[in-house]
């Protein structure tokens, strides 16, 4: 059983090393799109409304002209 639901208002950032390449806030569907140049990144949630904690960062490799889906889940404790 999937107990997940989209979270609006979560802040997502894309970083490489100590440099931020972009950030945005999720919409009502829990979706965000952040354009970055090709490279290796970590995708992080820095704010997640109603969450007990933040999910771990997720690694993402971006090739030129590609779109890379990343799924991050904030745990609200609701079961």
Image (cartoon, rainbow, N blue to C red):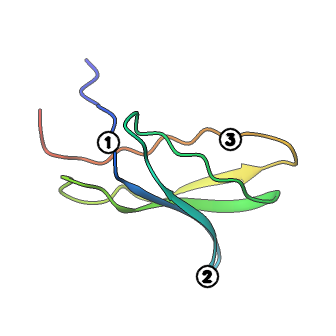
Q: Quadrant of the C terminus?
A: top left
| Vertical arrangement, residue 10 with respect to residue 77, above or below | below
Q: Which mark is residue 7?
A: 1
Judge by depth and name the residue closer to the eye, 42 or 37: 37
Q: Residues within 10 Å of mark 1 (few under 14, many from 20)?
A: many
Q: Which residue is mark 3?
A: 68
The x, y position of residue 9, in whole percent, is: 34, 52
Q: Residue at x 34, y 44 (%)?
A: 8
Q: Quadrant of the N terminus?
A: top left
Disc 2 and disc 1 in contact, CB within 8 angstroms: no
Q: Residue at x 65, y 77 (%)?
A: 17
Q: Which residue is mark 2?
A: 18
Q: Earlier in the sequence, mark 3 or mark 1?
A: 1
**Marks 2, 1: nearer the viewer:** 1
Disc 2 and disc 3 in contact, CB within 8 angstroms: no
Q: Residues within 10 Å of mark 2 (few under 14, many from 20)?
A: few
Helix, strand or loop status at disc 2: loop
On screen, residue 54 versus residue 15, left or right, reads left
The x, y position of residue 45, in whole percent, is: 42, 59
On screen, residue 8 versus residue 53, left or right, reads right
Q: CA distance from mark 2 to mark 3?
A: 21 Å
Helix, strand or loop status at disc 1: loop
């Amino acid at each position: 059983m999937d107990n997940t639901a989209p979270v609006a208002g979560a802040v997502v950032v894309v970083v490489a090393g100590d440099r931020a390449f972009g950030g945005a806030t999720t919409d009502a569907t829990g979706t965000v799109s952040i354009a970055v140049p090709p490279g290796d990144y970590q995708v992080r949630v820095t704010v997640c409304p109603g969450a007990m904690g933040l999910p771990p960062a997720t690694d993402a490799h971006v090739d030129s002209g590609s779109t890379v889906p990343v799924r991050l889940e904030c745990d609200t404790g609701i079961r």
